[in-house]
């Protein structure tokens, strides 16, 4: 150890110090958080997967693990309804629709499970890894793969209906945003900073718009990936890019309504008159729905590697890399409760 430290010292490296995560915020009169139930889904992976998230369907919550477990839990009690081992390296999902669960895998498969008992309805081999949660509507399952393809599958049997191909830049973030399905269209944010709307029925391009233009000399500086899921509210589509912009579009025509400089790889969430965003420094912001103007920005959780936001009642909820969950007041952005899970 002494020799190693000495050798490192002799190299005289000039490293830029890394700022630590912000300390846990001090909360005056914190709200009481009560744990109702907990269940271990099990399974660990050599890779890190921020793409696995629970899905709610009816009176159950569904979850999956990276090593292939899938489980259904009664929402009110936390008691398992069923648990199966798929044998797959699950990397995305699940999503719930029409009593069907959809999962994506590192080996480029899409699995459709029965939400009733977990039995496998069909498996479909795709062209590359599936890191974005597959979504389904109107009998069509839409799958985004890492090679830039968006594929429409028949939800009943997994047969192919259509494929849309896009060009992937030479360097991108590891991740892809899930398609958002609304009014017979699939809205997808691409790794080149563009957002597209595809017709669910046949996969034809309805419109395409550029959210952010790549700039800079290096490939790293030119990354403008859209890795978070878009949000839809009140006839508007809202998208954010890494090292680029957040923008609002008319959902029907694709016309840009507003944009503002920012950088994020997380999904947006919209409600009432606001859009909520977590940027790449873990700043949390509320933006006006119609203009994109900031209403408030909270920096108490800087560099804590926050998840995308979720909404519950009058609170905004985020979690961090250390396993803490934070509740924020939606009107001010102040942290009002925290709990380590």
Image: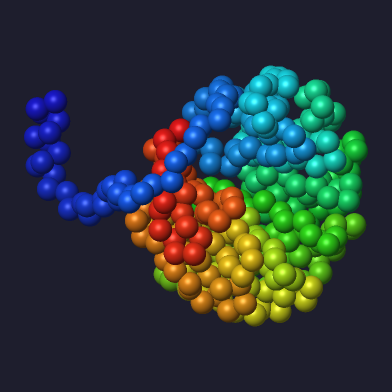
Q: In this view, does 314 lie above or below 88?
A: below
Q: Quadrant of residue 104?
A: top right
Q: Which of 231 and 43 is in front in this view?
A: 231
Q: Residue 18's x, y, as percent?
A: 26, 51
The answer to whether residue 147 is seen in the rendering is no
Q: In this view, does 129 lie above or below 273?
A: above
Q: Residue 64's x, y, as percent?
A: 64, 30
- Left or right: residue 93 versus residue 285 is right
Residue lying at the far front in this picture: please name it.
29
Image point (68%, 39%), residue name: 55
Image point (47%, 57%), residue name: 329
Image point (46%, 33%), residue name: 341
Q: Quadrant of residue 11?
A: top left
- Left or right: residue 51 versus residue 48 is right
Q: Which of 201 and 314 is in front in this view?
A: 314
Q: How many labels does the image show?
A: 0
């Amino acid at each position: 150890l002494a020799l190693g430290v000495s050798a490192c010292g002799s190299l005289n490296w000039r490293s830029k110090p890394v700022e630590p995560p912000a300390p846990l915020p001090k909360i005056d009169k914190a709200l009481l958080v009560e744990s109702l139930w907990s269940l271990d889904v099990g399974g660990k992976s050599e890779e890190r997967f921020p793409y696995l998230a629970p899905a709610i369907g009816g009176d159950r919550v569904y979850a999956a693990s990276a090593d292939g477990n899938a489980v259904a839990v009664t929402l009110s009690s936390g008691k398992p309804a069923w648990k199966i081992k798929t044998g797959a390296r699950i990397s995305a999902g699940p999503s719930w629709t029409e009593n069907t669960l959809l999962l994506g895998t590192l080996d480029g498969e899409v699995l459709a499970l029965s939400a009733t008992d977990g039995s496998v309805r069909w498996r479909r081999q795709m062209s590359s890894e599936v890191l974005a949660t597959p979504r389904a509507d109107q009998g069509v399952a839409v799958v985004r793969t890492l090679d830039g393809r968006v594929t429409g599958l028949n939800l009943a049997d997994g047969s192919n209906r259509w494929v849309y191909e896009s060009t992937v830049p030479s360097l991108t973030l590891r991740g892809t945003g899930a398609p958002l399905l609304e009014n017979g269209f699939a809205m997808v944010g691409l790794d080149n900073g563009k957002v597209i709307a595809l017709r669910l029925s046949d996969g034809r391009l309805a419109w395409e718009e550029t959210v952010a233009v790549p700039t800079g000399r290096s490939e790293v500086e030119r990354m403008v990936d859209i890795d978070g899921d878009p949000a839809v509210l009140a006839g508007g589509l809202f998208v954010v890019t890494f090292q680029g912009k957040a923008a609002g579009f008319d959902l029907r025509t694709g016309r840009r309504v507003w944009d503002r400089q920012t950088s994020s790889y997380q999904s947006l969430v919209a409600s009432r008159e606001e859009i909520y965003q977590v940027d790449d420094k873990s700043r949390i912001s509320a933006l006006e729905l119609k203009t994109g103007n900031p209403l408030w920005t909270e920096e108490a959780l800087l560099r804590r590697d926050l998840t995308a936001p979720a909404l519950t009642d009058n609170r905004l909820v985020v979690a961090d890399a250390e396993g803490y969950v934070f509740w924020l007041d939606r009107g001010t952005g102040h942290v009002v409760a925290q709990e380590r899970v």
